[in-house]
Image: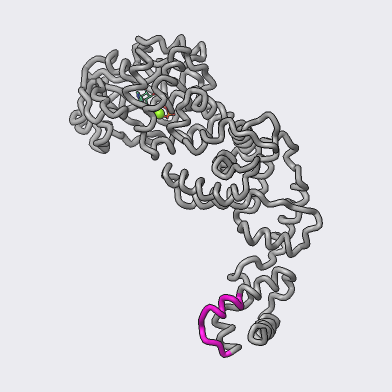
Amino acid sequence: MHVLTSLWGAGHAAYLVGGGVRDALLGKTVTDWDVATDALPERLLELFPGGGYDNRFGTVRVPSADMELEVTTFRRDHQYADHRRPDSVTFTTSLDEDLARRDFTVNAIAWSRDGLADPTGGLADLSAGVLRAVGEPQVRFDEDALRLLRAARLAAQLDFEIEPSTLAAMSTTAATVQHVSSERIGEELRKILRASPPSRALQILADTGVLRFALPELDAQRGIAQDKAPGMDLWAHCLAATDAAAQLAPANPRLRLAALVHDIGKPGTLADGHFIGHDTEGARLAELLLGRLAFPRREVEAVADLVRYHMFSYEPRWSGAAVRRFIRRVGRNLVDELLDLRAADNIGSGLPAKAGHLDELRTRVASELAAGAPLTLLELALRGDDLTAALDLAPGPVVGDLLEHLLQWVLDDPARNERAALIAEARMELERSSAG
Ligand code: ATP
Ligand code: MG
């Protein structure tokens, strides 16, 4: 790695550190490497003129052919007044000091051409599958509450057990997670949902009490009984559905997110053992939650729609028009995912994935889509302008109402989507409405 050899050649100490070393030792492929060195940032920029200085972290990013390289000067962190990462650091020339400020022992192993440096016992923990805080766990979580989320996430990602005193300290310091920005919580949640199974880290967060402060809307589902799956509270159901979503659609993290929040409206709508309107309320809460976590707008809207529509109940006696109206309501782009969400919801309730004639609905949706039936106003064989011209109408709300009527008429029978027929029907509808 040219960065290391350049630094060594210039007489500096330089090591690979952090998650890259950890993952390489576990035999995983590594794409992001971190380098720690005694060279100061100014010196780094002299040695690597193409490097970019990241002011927030005092890190120099060195572009490299096929990987991300972050080079960081050995440091001691200090000032954790607000339970977040410190905004001032002190550089040091001691590798051991730099390793001591890292979060977990498995993240505090350094590699150089002379071999591994492991002052905190990370190698032993790595081979035992243990995630252990460096130093005094309670102090370390209290300093930087992001570590609470990283602990749960890394334990799940690596399939490690959290060492008992580290785990206990997570419970004691849980409330400090309130000081972590929502955006960071969102980033960690995204990584948590990619771990397998996604429920593992979420359950750790729930058990330690971190969830209550990090994602209160999700925590509110704990302890709420529901009749769909007796003996399973809403939270257990939500986790089971999320794991099922990961299995059903490994390449689609959005489905996991939707499964995670699909019943988020239930706690607030519970009355007399029923959850009336929890779909609408859930869509509202999902939008608020994911918006706060700074998820991309499109993803927020898609998940909110999945929650909004997840309560459909299909019957084999649905007409073709009913199937088309269903697709129109949900949206062509989201309908398959909604059926996947139902399958995950089914599994999460202890039912077969296809319960509720889901396979039949899937087949019928697919054939409607393949037939290319018009499902939106834009797919009608005429525009508002055509109507105003043909019927001598002034533009206005009447035109919108007519177009909507025509779409409903065409949803009943797609063969009607033909310009002359549409104009004739619009004329009749106008007469009907002026008579009535
Ligand atoms: P991943 O890249 O999968 O998120 P990682 O362990 O590499 O995991 P990074 O955020 O890339 O995490 O950080 C690199 C290293 O910096 C970590 O391995 C750890 O040594 C140290 N580190 C990161 N965040 C913290 C923190 N909040 N407190 C202490 N040390 C940290
Ligand atoms: Mg990393």
Q: Residue at x 73, y 69 (%)?
A: 412
Give above or below for 218 relative to 315: above
Q: Residue at x 60, y 50 (%)?
A: 277
> Would you identify the image quadrant in which residue 45 lies?
top left
Compare residues 10 and 328 and report the one nearer the observer. Answer: 328
Compare residues 155 and 199 and report the one nearer the observer. Answer: 199
Answer with left or right where residue 278 lies relative to residue 320: left
Quarter of the N terminus within the rendering: top left
Going by the picture, which residue comes out furthest to the right?
A: 317
Quarter of the C terminus within the rendering: bottom right
Answer with left or right where residue 248 lies relative to residue 81: right
Residue 189 in percent (x, y) is at 47, 35
Answer with left or right where residue 170 lies relative to residue 306: left
Q: Quadrant of ligand 1?
A: top left
Q: Residue at x 41, y 30 (%)?
A: 32
Q: Can residue 389 be spotted in the picture?
A: yes
- Range of magenta residues: 392-403
Residue 413 in percent (x, y) is at 74, 71
Residue 304 in percent (x, y) is at 54, 50
Look at the image and say whether residue 69 sits in the magenta stretch.
no
Q: Residue at x 58, y 30 (%)?
A: 223
